[in-house]
Image (cartoon, rainbow, N blue to C red):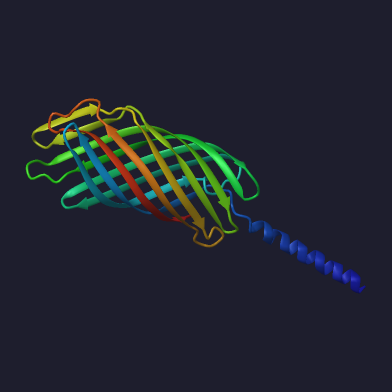
């Protein structure tokens, strides 16, 4: 009788425990992430006779939806939009970017995964230099294609991801506007630019999951021609940034 009662108790405990263990597994559903981003950019302007460098801190917001941080195997996807703004010594930088990625992920083992991705997007950038003579806008618009590889390591309540790849700008254009004087637009040469991002999503099973990222982007704007109002025909931007956001 005692043995029968003990067996019944054990079976009851196991039945209660199995759902608990199953619910503890990280979710593989896509998630939204929304938060703040900050960056530090080195802007280098190159011409036939001179070079100028500016250093600009920026701040802004990002919104991301996808399963790059949660999926284990199969289709992975992500869509992100971001915007930044900076003002320093009467110089302004404004940025907007949209990215869309699709890829496929395979498992190396129970906790390690790799994926390859293809995608595209659009980059909008405006630089307003400090000028005593004119109000100047230098605006660049660059659609791009991208290819990347990613690696995920899954901890018990967090996920670490490293992604690296290239963006290929396609059919971009740059506009130089001197308010009240001239407004010229030139095509940009297609360029290939690297990027890398390291992300950690933690507290995945808590009430408020969080994500933090470090990233590097390069954007190169190479004019297919020459603006009459300036000697500069190339702009290279190296951007080092951090993102911190809520996941829901």
Task: Tell which of 87 and 218 is nearer to you.
Answer: 218
Identity of the residue furthest to the front in this view: 49
Task: Tell which of 225 and 46 is nearer to you.
Answer: 46
Quadrant the N terminus occupies? bottom right
Please indicate whether residue 41 sits to the left or right of residue 32 in the image: left
Q: Is residue 160 above or below residue 17?
A: above
Q: Is residue 219 above or below residue 184?
A: below
Q: Find residue 23 and report its horizontal and vertical position in percent.
A: 64, 57
Identity of the residue furthest to the bottom in this view: 2
Task: Tell which of 130 and 9 is nearer to you.
Answer: 130
Question: Which residue: 77% across, 63% down?
Answer: 14
Q: Find residue 228 and report its horizontal and vertical position in percent.
A: 13, 29
Question: Which residue: 46% across, 50% down?
Answer: 198
Please indicate whether residue 12 sits to the left or right of residue 165 in the image: right
Q: Find residue 241 and report its horizontal and vertical position in percent.
A: 36, 51
Identity of the residue furthest to the left in this view: 133
Q: Is residue 66 above or below residue 204?
A: above
Question: Which residue: 42% across, 36% down?
Answer: 166
Please indicate whether residue 89 sits to the left or right of residue 173 in the image: left
Query: How many dots with numbers?
Result: 0
Q: Is residue 159 above or below residue 132?
A: below
Q: Find residue 99 and report its horizontal and vertical position in percent.
A: 41, 39
Please indicate whether residue 207 sits to the left or right of residue 171 in the image: right
């Amino acid at each position: 009788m005692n043995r029968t009662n003990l067996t019944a108790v054990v079976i009851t405990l196991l039945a209660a425990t199995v759902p608990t263990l199953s619910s503890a597994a990280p979710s593989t559903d896509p998630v939204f992430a929304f938060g703040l981003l900050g960056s530090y950019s080195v802007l280098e302007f190159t011409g036939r006779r001179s070079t100028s460098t500016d250093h600009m801190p920026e701040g802004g917001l990002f919104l991301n939806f996808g399963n790059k941080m949660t999926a284990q195997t199969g289709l992975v996807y992500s869509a992100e939009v971001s915007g930044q703004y900076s003002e320093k010594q009467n110089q302004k930088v404004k940025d907007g970017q949209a990215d869309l990625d699709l890829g496929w992920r395979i498992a190396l083992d129970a906790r390690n995964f790799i994926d390859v991705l293809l995608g595209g997007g659009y980059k909008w950038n405006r630089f307003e230099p400090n000028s005593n003579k004119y109000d100047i806008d230098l605006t660049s618009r660059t659609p791009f294609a991208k290819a990347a590889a990613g690696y995920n390591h899954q901890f018990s309540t967090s996920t670490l991801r490293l992604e690296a790849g290239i963006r290929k700008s396609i059919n971009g254009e740059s506009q130089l506007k001197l308010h009240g004087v001239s407004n010229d637009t030139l095509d940009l040469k297609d360029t290939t630019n690297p990027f890398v991002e390291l992300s950690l999503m933690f507290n995945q099973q808590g009430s408020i999951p969080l994500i933090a990222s470090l990233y590097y982007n390069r954007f190169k704007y190479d004019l297919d021609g020459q603006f009459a109002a300036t000697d500069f025909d190339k702009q290279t931007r190296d951007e080092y940034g951090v993102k911190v956001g809520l996941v829901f």
